[in-house]
Image: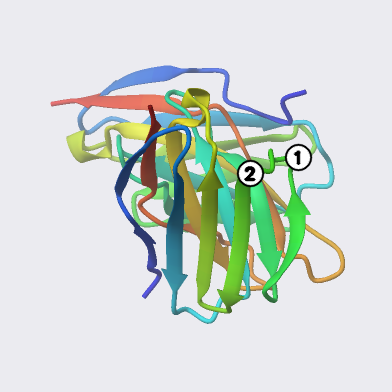
Amino acid sequence: DTEVTQTPKHLVMGMTNKKSLKCEQHMGHRAMYWYKQKAKKPPELMFVYSYEKLSINESVPSRFSPECPNSSLLNLHLHALQPEDSALYLCASAAMFGNTIYFGEGSWLTVV
Amino acid sequence: DQQVKQNSPSLSVQEGRISILNCDYTNSMFDYFLWYKKYPAEGPTFLISISSIKDKNEDGRFTVFLNKSAKHLSLHIVPSQPGDSAVYFCAASRTLYNNAGNMLTFGGGTRLMVKP
């Protein structure tokens, strides 16, 4: 089972709203990721968590706030987003000493 | 600076023939390479990978070749099927230090269209 589950699949939010994207995996992976993908572009790395600690932040604006409550869950808290933040947000996970990163189906975010 | 490049944005192939998707990279620190397939509105699906210690890996209809000296890899699909039509992303990985996991750098993608 190589499943990464993301909710919600679609989210529309206003620029003053606070919302969260959720991600779950039960593969025992200790590395978890958030990527952002715009249309016709490759996924871009946002954050990396290893052993539930933030290890990489790719200079992401503070209106995106990641959280890793435990080894199976990864959240992305959203606040005061801009319309240009509309994109597909992908969660992924990998075994710590493995090289294959598995992606979820993504959450489509539209900021209005 | 684009470290992983897929120079062909699209490729059209007849059903039953071979599809060859190419990828070039510049960073010699990359030690693992992956191909992902992506349908619209879905996340990337892992297809096949290759370690930098190998030059070929095969899985069914999919074969990945790695030429480290040329910093080039390719994905061969034989025979191509209409269901293979999707965007294919090449990705390169390097092992981070301090148990920080691995990081993927993606190419720009190649849209493959397999015609019946």
From this viewpoint, which residue is outermost toward the left? B116
Q: Would you place residue A95 above or below residue B36 in this image?
A: below
- Residue at the image position 43 percent from the left and 61 percent from the top: A22
The disc, 1 or 2, on the residue closer to the chain's N-terminal end is 2
Q: Position of residue A76 (x, y in %)?
A: 53, 55
Q: Secondary structure at mark 2?
A: strand
Cβ atoms under marks 1 and 2 closer than 8 Å: no
Q: Secondary structure at mark 1?
A: loop
Q: Are marks 1 and 2 on the same chain?
A: yes
Q: Position of residue B33 (x, y in %)?
A: 63, 49
- Residue at the image position 38 percent from the left and 47 percent from the top: A107
Q: Which residue is mark 2?
A: A45
- Disc 1 sits on a residue from what chain? A
Cα distance in 3D space between marks 1 and 2: 10 Å
Question: Horizontal placement of B54 versus A104: left or right?
Answer: right
Q: Would you place residue A92 above or below residue B110 in this image?
A: below
* Quadrant in which the N terminus of chain B appears: top right
> In this orientation, which residue lies closer to the viewer: B101 or B37?
B101
Inspect the image, locate mark 1, and give the three-letter code of the amino acid beneath it: Ser
Inspect the image, locate mark 2, and give the three-letter code of the amino acid beneath it: Leu
Question: Horizontal placement of B82 versus B7: left or right?
Answer: left
| Res. B36 in view | yes
- Residue at the image position 53 percent from the left and 35 percent from the top: A81
- Disc 2 sits on a residue from what chain? A
Q: Position of residue A23 (x, y in %)?
A: 44, 63
Q: Would you place residue A106 above or below residue A60 in this image?
A: below
* Quadrant in which the C terminus of chain B appears: top left
Q: Which residue is mark 1?
A: A59
